Amino acid sequence: MKLSSASTLLFASFVQSTSALTVSSSSQLAQLAAMTTLSIDSGDLNVISDYAETGLITDATTNPLFVSQAGLSGDPVYASMVDEAVQFAVGQCEDQVDAVPLAIDALAVNLGEAISKIVPGYISTEVDPRLSFDTEASVERARRIIQMYAAKGVSKDRVLIKLAATWEGIMAAKILEEEGITCNLTLIFSHIQAVACAQYGARLISPFPGRILDWYKKTLDRSEPVNPEDDEGVVAVKKMYCYYKIWGHENTICMPASWRPSRGSGYELDEIRELAGVDRMTIPAPLLEKLASCEEPLPQKLNVEDAKKSGEPLIGNGRIGEKEFRYLMNMDGAGNDKVAEGIRAFIGETEKLELAITEKVQAFVKIS
């Protein structure tokens, strides 16, 4: 599937429309980038381009919500991607039922390819979240996504396949990593998920400190603010980071995402600042803007030397099994509840997009 001339022109138009951002070298964004590799959490090509131009953002992450927003936006740039994806899928499939999921994957790859032209590092593309409990199907879809990227000239070394960190998702990542396909295990809310991902060789995990905090606030019926260092989401990510450094999981990157203000409104950067020094972070544009506008010193809170002194115990004798994993997940309230909630939310966005793509496929078949 080659990039169409129409898409090339539209890519040029969005690049021309971007406005250069000026970020001070003394800003907290620059300070943070000096100790943590930064990714932008967005599917907006203009926004990604703006921040990539600063030289402080190297990667970009997307999810089903971003792909759905792109597919449904009506913006000419994204409309071209949708039309190209539908045309490709219909040309490849005899059955419209098969063409729809292929078109959705093709759209995600089109968006990812565009992002790969803007950032120099990783791009993340998610496998259909409805496959989160099917290892074999997840592996097949991931391979297809990588093949589609290869056809567009994007090396698999640039792509992280996003999978939900269920047991089946972790096993899919194990297979893919052994084939040289790197994976981003997402929807991490419990320590056991993080441990299992590393033990089975995942390249990167995405824990969600903000959503962990949400769970504790709701469960404990807590309305009062909490100090950032006591924020349950921050504590969970620090524990994951320390475990990796103690037990030799240097090849698995800890990249938190999804942020909340520990102390409430006006303190939106609490969790980010408290995790400064973690391997990587993916941060949405509004929070990047806040970091860019702040000139206060940003102390590094995490580092390898201190992490190795934290004393996190070995789990599962270095290779946890399925029964123990499922038991410990069940016993972790935040992990169990938030994974299910996250998968449902991602499926909801995917199904919205599926309805729109189905209409596009049907319309294309009628006129072709």
Image (cartoon, rainbow, N blue to C red):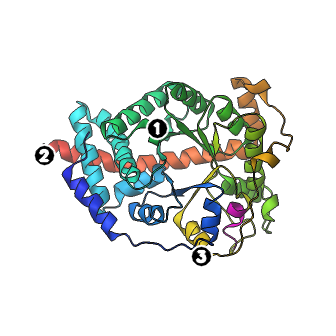
Which amino acid, by three-letter code, is at mark 1?
Answer: Asp
User: Depth-wise, is mark 2 or mark 1 nearer the camera?
Assistant: 1
222 horizontally vs 352: left or right: right
Tell me if mark 2 has few (under 14), some (14-19) or many (20+) residues whose alpha carbon lies within 10 angstroms of its own.
few
338 horizontally vs 179: left or right: right
Which amino acid, by three-letter code, is at mark 2?
Answer: Ile
Query: Residue at horizontal 55%, vertical 71%?
Result: 289
Q: CA distance from mark 2 to mark 1?
A: 39 Å
Location of mark 2 (residue): 367
Say whether disc 1 or disc 3 marks the residue closer to the N-terminus: 1
Instruction: Please indicate, yes or no, whether residue 333 appears anywhere in the rendered image.
Output: no
User: Depth-wise, is mark 3 or mark 2 nearer the camera?
Assistant: 3
Residue at the outermost left position: 368
- Residue 49 vs 332, above or below: the answer is below
Tell me if mark 3 has few (under 14), some (14-19) or many (20+) residues whose alpha carbon lies within 10 angstroms of its own.
some
Location of mark 1 (residue): 157
